[in-house]
Image: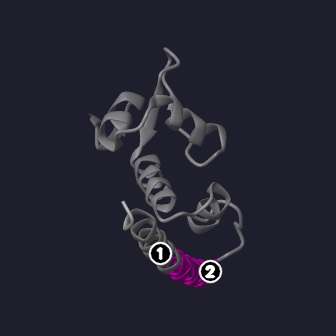
Amino acid sequence: MKRQGKEIFYTISDLASEFDISTRSIRFYEEKNLISPRRTDGNQRIYSRRDHVRLKLILRGKRFGYSLEEISEIIGLTDFDLDEVEQIRKTLAMGQKKITDVRERINDLKLLEEELVSFQAKMDARLKELTSDE
């Protein structure tokens, strides 16, 4: 993080280090228009506090399992006509859908675990049958 007058800005290296991601990832988010750094006279990328916050939101969204398209919607990049209340409502609805999806996956994994435990028990019993004569 650097200061230029009252303004705070970050280099690509600053962001990569802080968020423990590659500079290539940051450039990828730039290509997808999720962040938009300015350029210095020497063509170096300079990221604003806004870019910093957006990158933090992007990474949090990815961690929560959102697609880049969903993240773009959440941070308000796709629908410029939404006011803040509508944006929050849309984000809450997307969050509720994600919670439902996660709960369904948890249930599926629990069923899978039960099936695997049952299969293991059957195989263990069969192995004991086969080796009891030895």
Instruction: Tell me if residue 133 comes above or below residue 33 in the rendering.
Output: below
Mark 1 in CB contact with mark 2 (< 8 angstroms):
no
Return the residue nearer the eye: 94 or 129: 129
Return the residue nearer the eye: 132 or 124: 132
Q: Provide the secondary structure element on which disc 2 rests.
A: helix
Residue 77: assigned label: none
Residue 58 visible in the current orientation: yes
Q: Quadrant of the N terminus?
A: top left
The number of callouts visible is 2
Q: Which residue is mark 2?
A: 90
Mark 2: few/some/many CA within 10 Å (<14, 14-19, 20+):
some
The residue range painted magenta reads 83-112
- Coordinates of residue 51 in the picture (x, y in percent): 46, 47
- Coordinates of residue 108 in the picture (x, y in percent): 56, 78
- Coordinates of residue 89 in the picture (x, y in percent): 58, 85
Q: Which residue is mark 1?
A: 113
